[in-house]
Amino acid sequence: MLLRRAFSRFFVFYFIERPGFDAIPGPLKRMSTLFTESPFWLVIAGILLTGVLVVLYRELHNQRLLPWLALSVGLVVVPVLTDWIVETTRETLQRRVFEMAGAVRRNDVDGLLRFVDKDATDVINQINGEIPRYRFSVCSVTSEPRVDVEPGNPRRAKVQFRVLVSADDLAIQTQTLPGVRDVHMEFALNETGQWKLVAFAHYGIPEIQGILGR
């Protein structure tokens, strides 16, 4: 596990997020994410190409087809291994968002604070002031979290998503209607290589709140 994590961090930084990567042409960037996040079509192409080459080799017995056959097998194996080994920043932070939503749904304040940077006192105070006021029954991420790594600074990233929540307000002993919130978070990579929350805010969505009668 430690070896896999170390290789993942090296691969992500050196090939995807290191300073200067923004200068790389768009097609090459998309190719890197094709290997690390969405290798499905590469694998399908590799399987089809391998099948065609196997048939040709069996019919023709042409030794010159063997290097191409090995290349087509690599087109299947390499993306699968890369996708399994490498977890990009986007994947890490999206997973983090779902873990935090789960902590809110379980009303686990300590579990939520585990994802917060120890020096982010404003965030810690905000969570301690807001979350214990409610008993959550629903906290579901309703959109794919959008992750934006700061240009030239791969150690900071912003995440935006929408979340559906429903909770009892413990102060007035009433159940609130389900609500949809826009959530903006900012994460920083700390000295131990972990992404920690350093700022966040959430906003009501007027058009949706109106439909819900809030």
Image (cartoon, rainbow, N blue to C red):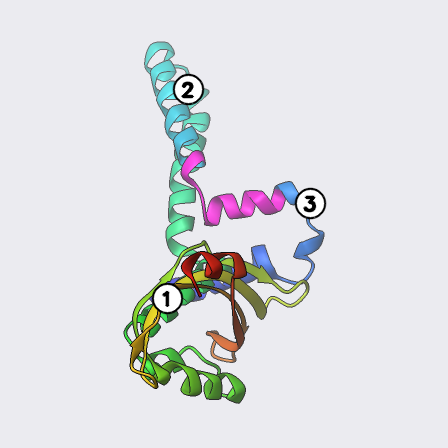
Earlier sequence position, callout 3 versus callout 1: 3
**Tag 2 residue:** 63
What quarter of the picture does the C terminus occupy?
Answer: bottom left
Q: Which SS does the magenta portion mostly show?
A: helix
Instruction: Give neighbour class at mark 2: few <14, some 14-19, many 20+ (Cα, 10 Å).
Output: few
Residue that mark 1 sits on: 165
Res. 88 in view:
no
Q: Is residue 6 left or right of residue 16?
A: left
Position of the N terminus by quadrant = bottom left
Q: Which residue: 41% across, 15% down?
A: 62
Determine which quarter of the picture holds residue 3.
bottom left
Q: Quadrant of residue 127?
A: bottom left
Q: Residues within 10 Å of mark 3 (few under 14, many from 20)?
A: few
- Above or below — where is 186 with respect to 148? below
Q: Nearer the viewer, residue 80 or 179?
A: 179
Q: CA distance from mark 3 to mark 1?
A: 41 Å
| SS category of the residue bearing label 3 | loop
Amino acid type of the residue tagged 3 in the rendering: Pro
3 or 2: tag closer to the N-terminus: 3
Rendered position, 24 above or below 17: above
Element type where label 2 sits in the image: loop
- The alpha-carbon separation of the residues under discs 3 and 2 comes to 37 Å
The picture places residue 23, in percent across and down from the top left corner, at: 72, 52
Q: Residue at x 32, y 15 (%)?
A: 58
Q: Amino acid at mark 1?
A: Val
Q: What residue does disc 3 label?
A: 25
Marks 3,2: beta carbons within 8 A:
no
Residues in magenta, as a range: 28-41
